[in-house]
Image (spheres, helix red, strand yellow):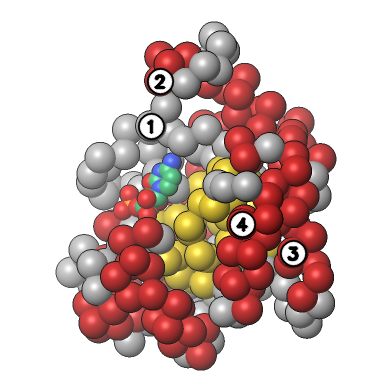
């Protein structure tokens, strides 16, 4: 079974990211490329990671009209990424167009398509300010996760605290990807609600996203080995 660990490559340049990536084994981890690195290093850097044998999660959270998102998903899929994501709040037509765009490419190994529901930075006040009249952000998380599943997406990004309930309401096969994971004893950084890799696995989380506890560790490979051990 390949690793359930996704390392967040939050570096400001391709050069800095590559120094770190050169130490890694693609059997031991997957890699997440988000806005910071993608805007600095572009698709060529993603191609480099794919060519080195890494499963790449392209975390660009597409959110636009269906036709534009469909085009973006096609471009991402052609890079050979393993997973990509869109905002579920883009609506059913956008989600359907995203999935169809990937299917139309007829790739031997199409990327997994997952959705972002409610950003964890959004509390009730923030949601209500955008016109979403829920008492609890969780209600909106579950609503959007169900929408994503109904439109055929493979899973969602969710917080560790949401995982148990989402597995229950959406089923074991619906993939959950979770940041905010911290090995026991490591710094929380700016993450407020954290969970250890072991607890994440017990909660049914399929893939954990870990950044700074690995990228800023004195011995990143030791941290990777320990997390993989906990996830098994
Ligand atoms: O360094 P750290 O482990 O906190 O990195 C977590 C990664 O997951 C970052 O790339 C961050 O942008 C991402 N993320 C998050 N919380 C969310 C969504 C994404 O931490 N709700």
The residue that label 1 is drawn on is 121
Label 3: element kind = helix
Residue 216 image point, x, y percent: 21, 63
Q: Which mark is residue 68?
A: 4
Label 2 close to label 3 by CB (< 8 Å): no
Quadrant in the picture for residue 194: top left
- Please state which of the two labelled residues, at mark 1 or mark 2, is closer to the viewer: 2
The residue that label 2 is drawn on is 126
Q: How far apart are the alpha carbons under marks 2 and 3?
A: 32 Å
Number of residues whose C-alpha sits closer than 10 Å to that of mark 4, classed few (under 14), some (14–19) or many (20 or more): some
> Residue shown at 65%/69% (left/top)?
74
Q: Mark 3 CB in 8 Å range of ligand 1?
A: no
> Residue shown at 47%/21% (left/top)?
130
Q: How far apart are the alpha carbons under marks 1 and 3?
A: 30 Å
Q: Please determine whether, in this image, residue 224 is positioned above or below residue 165.
A: below
Q: How far apart are the alpha carbons under marks 4 and 1?
A: 26 Å
Label 1 close to label 2 by CB (< 8 Å): yes
- Please state which of the two labelled residues, at mark 4 or mark 2, is closer to the viewer: 4
Number of residues whose C-alpha sits closer than 10 Å to that of mark 3, classed few (under 14), some (14–19) or many (20 or more): many
Q: Earlier in the sequence, mark 4 or mark 2?
A: 4
- Please state which of the two labelled residues, at mark 2 or mark 3, is closer to the viewer: 3
């Amino acid at each position: 079974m390949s690793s359930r660990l996704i390392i967040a490559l939050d570096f400001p340049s391709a050069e800095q990211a590559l120094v770190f990536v050169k130490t890694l084994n693609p059997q031991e981890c997957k890699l997440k490329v988000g806005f910071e690195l993608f805007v600095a290093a572009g698709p060529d850097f993603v191609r480099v990671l794919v060519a080195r044998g890494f499963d790449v999660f392209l975390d660009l959270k597409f959110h636009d009209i269906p036709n534009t998102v469909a085009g973006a998903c096609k471009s991402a899929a052609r890079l050979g990424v393993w997973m990509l994501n869109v905002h579920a709040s883009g609506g059913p037509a956008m989600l359907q167009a995203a999935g169809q765009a990937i299917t139309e490419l007829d790739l031997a190994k199409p990327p997994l398509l997952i959705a972002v529901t409610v950003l964890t930075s959004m509390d009730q006040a923030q949601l209500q300010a955008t016109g979403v009249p829920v008492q609890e952000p969780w209600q909106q998380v579950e609503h959007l996760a169900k929408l994503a599943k109904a439109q055929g997406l493979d899973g969602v990004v969710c917080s560790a605290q949401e995982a148990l309930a989402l597995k229950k309401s959406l089923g074991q096969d619906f993939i959950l990807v979770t940041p905010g994971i911290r090995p026991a004893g490591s710094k929380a950084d700016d993450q407020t609600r954290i969970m250890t890799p072991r607890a994440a696995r017990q909660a049914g989380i399929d893939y954990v996203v870990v950044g700074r506890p690995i990228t800023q560790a004195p011995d990143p490979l030791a941290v990777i080995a320990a997390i993989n051990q906990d996830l098994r």
